[in-house]
Each structure stands twice: as structure tokens, then as C-alpha cells.
Image: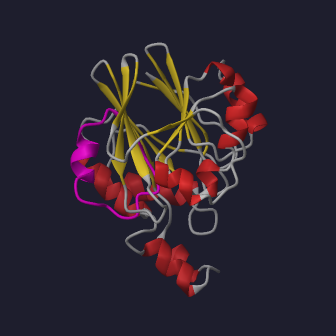
């Protein structure tokens, strides 16, 4: 299995996963040309992707789903509530395949478990991609460290995990009070320390960790990486960029 982030952050998200001849894109928060170009740089053709799977209705994850569908011919998978939320106008889509939160999607030898989150989207999910005994987690926009998340992490071989904000930067930053409460609340995001503690406690099986969905105002890669390294060591650790594709990760 290989995976890489095309981009990660409130300015747009998309992650590519390939295993057993199956090619999957998770989320469509960046323009089609950017997605095509970043996939091509890693030797992949966006038109050969078998499915676009949407995590939730916020624009940084769904905005360009209609473009990917019409321009590149990708079938789009999402929950009925996500489609109905209509946060971003998606335009005409002729091949939308619905799934229910908590269900397992199957693509030949690859399965994708959809995990409900407490984030404040209409019907948000995280993902666990499985192939030949190896498991990859795509765990962003989590809301808070909900029950069962630790056990899920303990089953993974690699993970993209939200490490959204540094509490001190958030409190001293320019966001209005209501937005600070939302970010720190039970339906917002998890902090660097919350993510680091989850990996320290439950990440014994992991081969690598890639920190994702870092805030531009309330975090930076150096701060996030430093917080994680203070909690655990000996595990390859990376931070996904808000502006370019990551390296290729392998399992």
C-alpha cells in the first residue's frame, strides 16, 4: 500500500491511497488542476482513480468533487446527509454512490471502513483502508478524542492524523472568541497534544505518522512536530503541507 497527501489544511484537503491495483482519492478540497498536477508528479494519473470518497460536507473537503467527477470521470462516494448539506455547490453529478456512516466500502481486495466522527459537519467520517492485513488511518476533522479512537489507532500500521492547533497560539491569536470555542469544543478539532498523546498511548503498531490539517493561524509544522517528539520517539514523523504534496508513504 502507498499513500500521500496532495494537500492538507483548511485551505483544502485530498489524500491518495493505492493498493492491490486499486486507486482511491479521499476528499476533493483542492482544484482539479492542482490535484492532477500533484498526482502526476508522483507518477499517477487522476483519470485512473477508481473512486473519490468524501469525508464530510465542509468546503475544504468537498468543494471540487463535482469538478473531479465531470472533468476526470471519477465516481463519487458520500453519505446522503453529506450530499444534502449542500455547503458547496457541486453542480451536475451523474455517478454519486451513497454509503451510510459506519459502513465498509469494498473495492476489489481493498476495504474502506468509514468511522463516524464528532466534528461539526453534517455526517462526518474518518477512514481505515485495509489491504492484505495492513491498515492505514485517515483521521482528520475528528471533533475530539472520542470513545474507541484509541483502539482504532492501535490497529493501524500508518496514519494521517489531525494535529490542528497549539492551545497557546490559539488563545493568543486573532480568532474571535466564538471560533476559539468551536475549535476547542467537542465538535471542533484536536490539538497537537491530544494527537501526540493518542499516538504515545496507542501507536505501538505504527510504522509512520503524518500530522495533518494543521492550522495556518494557530499552529506551524515546527510546533506540531516538537510537541509530538516530546511525547514519543523512534517513530518516523512527518507533517503534511498546506501547499504541496507530501512524500510517498509505504506500508
Q: Residue furthest top?
A: 21
> In screen coordinates, is 174 left or right of 212?
right
Residue at position x 67%, y 25% from top?
46
Quadrant location, the C terminus: top left
Q: x and y percent of residue 167 in the render?
A: 46, 73
Q: Which residues are magenta?
A: 138-157
Most common SS among magenta residues: loop
Q: x and y percent of residue 147 in the render?
A: 23, 59
Query: Up-down: is 25 above or below 179?
Result: above
Q: Nearer the viewer, residue 97 or 237?
A: 97
Quadrant location, the N terminus: top left
Residue at position x 50%, y 65% from top?
165
Query: Up-down: is 218 above or below 90?
Result: below
Q: Residue furthest bottom?
A: 177
Residue at position x 61%, y 84% from top?
176
Residue 141 shown in magenta: yes
Numbered label tally: 0
Query: Up-down: is 18 above or below 126?
Result: above
Q: Residue furthest right?
A: 33
Q: x and y percent of residue 108 in the render?
A: 40, 16
> In screen coordinates, is 244 left or right of 170?
right
- The image quadrant of residue 70 is top right
> In screen coordinates, is 25 left or right of 40?
left
Residue 161 shown in magenta: no
Q: x and y percent of residue 134 in the render?
A: 31, 25
* Residue 41 appears in the figure: no
Amino acid at each position: 500500500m502507498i499513500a500521500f497527501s496532495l494537500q492538507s489544511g483548511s485551505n483544502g484537503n485530498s489524500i491518495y491511497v493505492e493498493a492491490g491495483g486499486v486507486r482511491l482519492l479521499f476528499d476533493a478540497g483542492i482544484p482539479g488542476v492542482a490535484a492532477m498536477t500533484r498526482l502526476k508528479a508522483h507518477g499517477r494519473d487522476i483519470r485512473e482513480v477508481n473512486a473519490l470518497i468524501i469525508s464530510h460536507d465542509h468546503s475544504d473537503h468537498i468543494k471540487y468533487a463535482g469538478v473531479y467527477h465531470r472533468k476526470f470521470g471519477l465516481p463519487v462516494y458520500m453519505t446522503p446527509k453529506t450530499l444534502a448539506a449542500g455547503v458547496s455547490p457541486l453542480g451536475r453529478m451523474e455517478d454519486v454512490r451513497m454509503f451510510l456512516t459506519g459502513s465498509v466500502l469494498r473495492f476489489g481486495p481493498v476495504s474502506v471502513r468509514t468511522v463516524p466522527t464528532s466534528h461539526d459537519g453534517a455526517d462526518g467520517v474518518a477512514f481505515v483502508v485495509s489491504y492484505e492485513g495492513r491498515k492505514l488511518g485517515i483521521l482528520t476533522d475528528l471533533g475530539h478524542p472520542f470513545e474507541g479512537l484509541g483502539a482504532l489507532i492501535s490497529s493501524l500500521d500508518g496514519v494521517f492524523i489531525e494535529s490542528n492547533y497549539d492551545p497557546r497560539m490559539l488563545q493568543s491569536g486573532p480568532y474571535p472568541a466564538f471560533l476559539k470555542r468551536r475549535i476547542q469544543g467537542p465538535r471542533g478539532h484536536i490539538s497537537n497534544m491530544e494527537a501526540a498523546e493518542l499516538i504515545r498511548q496507542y501507536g505501538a503498531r505504527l510504522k509512520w505518522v503524518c500530522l495533518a490539517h494543521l492550522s495556518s493561524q494557530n499552529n506551524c509544522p515546527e510546533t506540531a512536530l516538537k510537541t509530538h517528539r516530546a511525547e514519543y520517539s523512534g517513530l518516523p514523523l512527518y507533517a503534511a503541507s498546506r501547499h504541496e504534496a507530501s512524500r510517498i508513504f509505504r506500508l
